[in-house]
Image (cartoon, rainbow, N blue to C red):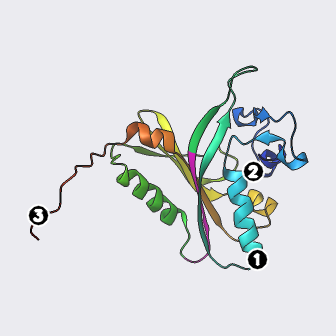
Amino acid sequence: FISPKAYDKIALPSDSPLRKCVVISNPLGEDTGVMRTSMLPSMLDTLSRNYNNRNLTAYLFENGKVYIPNGENELPNEDRTLSIGIYGDGADFFTLKGKVEAIFACAGIKDYDVEAVTDNPTYHPGRTAKFTVNGETLAVLGEIHPDVAENYSIGTKVYAAEISMDGIYKYQHTKRVYKPSPRFP
């Protein structure tokens, strides 16, 4: 559960489909009124907490779900997502891209395209990319826009990625073959 104001902090446009959230009818508080459609606010909150507690470097991940509404009387889709956030020593776009590529390699996904993204206001234009397979976006990664980083009181360059684990599972090409240990080593 997150606050609806979290989408303002990540500079999400008012007409973005990610703003259409599942609203909790009896929330625990003002800051937990909707179910998240993006893991970036949670990741940036955690990175901000680490940065403001004087941790000079952070490499974090969260494996969780985002909730995409299906209509009034329908249950939402629960999409499994992996979020990665980094800042500090050795943290840059290419470090993060390498981590995403390693996940794709572990899943055996080799036929993917990497395209530049310039229209996502959460990320710095020209320092953002998306990984696609058959036209479906499986990951978005890049440097967080300085204005968004300032909203979270992060005074350094910060990088984040969101990876669709459902998409990874859909396109994975891994075969695990069991090979018994020899009887007489």
Which residue: 57% across, 78% down?
89
- Label 2 neighbour load within 10 Å: few <14, some 14-19, many 20+: many
Q: Nearer the viewer, mark 1 or mark 3?
A: 3
Q: Amino acid at mark 2?
A: Ile
Of the image marks 1 and 2, the number of the one nearer the N terminus: 2
Cα distance in 3D space between marks 2 and 3: 58 Å
Q: Amino acid at mark 1?
A: Asn
Q: Most extreme residue toward the front, as rendered?
A: 183
Q: Amino acid at mark 3?
A: Arg
- Front-most of 156 and 180? 180
Of the image marks 1 and 3, the number of the one nearer the N terminus: 1
Cα distance in 3D space between marks 1 and 2: 21 Å
- Does the stretch in magenta take in 82? yes
Residue 124 seen in this snapshot:
yes
Cα distance in 3D space between marks 1 and 3: 54 Å
Numbered circle sitting on residue 53: 1
Task: Quickly name the residue at label 2.
Answer: 10
Task: Quickly name the residue at label 3.
Answer: 183
Which residue: 65% across, 52% down?
123
Region rendered in magenta: 81-89
- In the picture, which quadrant includes the C terminus? bottom left
- Front-most of 26 and 46? 26
Residue 112: which quarter of the image? Answer: top left
